[in-house]
Image (spheres, grey):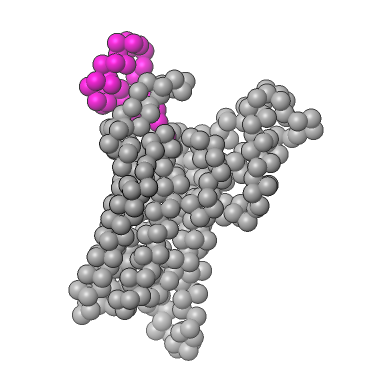
Amino acid sequence: MASSSFDIDAPQWDQSTFMGRLNHFFNITDWRTVTLPDSRLDEAKALVDSCRAGSVPPGTTEEQLHYAKKLYDSAFHPDTGDRMNLIGRMSFQVPGGMAITGFMLQFYRTVPAVVFWQWVNQSFNALVNYTNRNAASPITPKQIGVAYFTATSTALATAVGLNLYTKKAPPLVARWVPFVAVASANCVNVPMMRQQEILNGIAVTDENGNKLGHSKKAAVKGITQVVVSRITMAAPGMIILPIIMQRMEKYKFMQRITYLHGPIQVMLVGAFLVFMVPAACSLFPQRCSMAVSKLEPELRDSIVSQYGQAVKHVYFNKGL
């Protein structure tokens, strides 16, 4: 039985270690949560809010509270508490990513197919990046449009250009073109979709959550870590799977079922993503930290003038 003093926001696992974060993200990126209706998610949010207010409903167990927090973390934005759109949630990365990536890897030979699947992928990425941004930094519809157009153009130019360039290259090299395009686009898509954070800075706090100001350097650090995580998330499936498929396609039974190559790749990508989504999210703490000495001079001086040397680090939500 849970007591009214139960701290629902206390992490179940040590967030300072990779394994602790891995357990945490395995929990909240569980793709099965996307099958739950909004009413069930709202019930979980209500239970989390009640617990935070110190009024745990009678008969509620700690196990029920932990499950409610899992659903809350998987579906509600950490900054605003608003329910996120289904496709943009990190828990949708496995079903969404496996379908899109599988077909990108399968249909890489013709320019129209490359254009279509890269466009689909960048549309998906743009929605994920917008959904998981640091919500304290608003972005206008015009900025969203520019970010989407820029990232999509980068992906298409990279994919089509390399597709044409590798016509005479070994088959395996051509199979790796989608990954290069995806990695290049991620380097554009994430910063562009979150440009307000870079232009205006993101809110930074002390270890107790007291707001200290806004930092552009913190924004750059957080966004850089997100880009690395996104590329890492895609890398194993998009680099290793082409090698596997190239070898499998030499077998006669595979040559007789060419119509199943696409679905096979989708399922194999899913197997990679089930592990890689939480692993990539776990590379860096979501509550990112930065030494005060590395902040902009104005913000650093402001913090030192108010708190002296008492505050050594600032903290911020880097997004996902």
Q: Does 110 appear above or below 1? A: below
- Quarter of image, res 8: top right
Looking at the rendered image, the quarter that the N terminus falls into is top right
Residue at x-position 42% and y-position 79%: 248
Q: Position of residue 318 (x, y in %)?
A: 39, 38
Q: Position of residue 37 (x, y in %)?
A: 66, 52
Front position in the image: 251 or 185? 185
Q: Which residues are magenta?
A: 289-317
Residue at x-position 48% and y-position 83%: 259
- Quarter of image, res 284: top left
Left or right for 57, reference 211: right
Q: Position of residue 291 (x, y in %)?
A: 31, 25
Q: Magenta span has 41?
A: no
Q: Magenta span has 314?
A: yes
Q: Residue extending furthest right?
A: 59
Q: Does 255 appear above or below 241? A: below
Front position in the image: 265 or 91? 91
Residue at x-position 50% and y-position 80%: 260
Left or right for 209, reference 82: left
Left or right for 165, reference 113: left
> Number of labelled discs?
0
Q: Does 245 appear above or below 217? A: below
Front position in the image: 3 or 18? 3
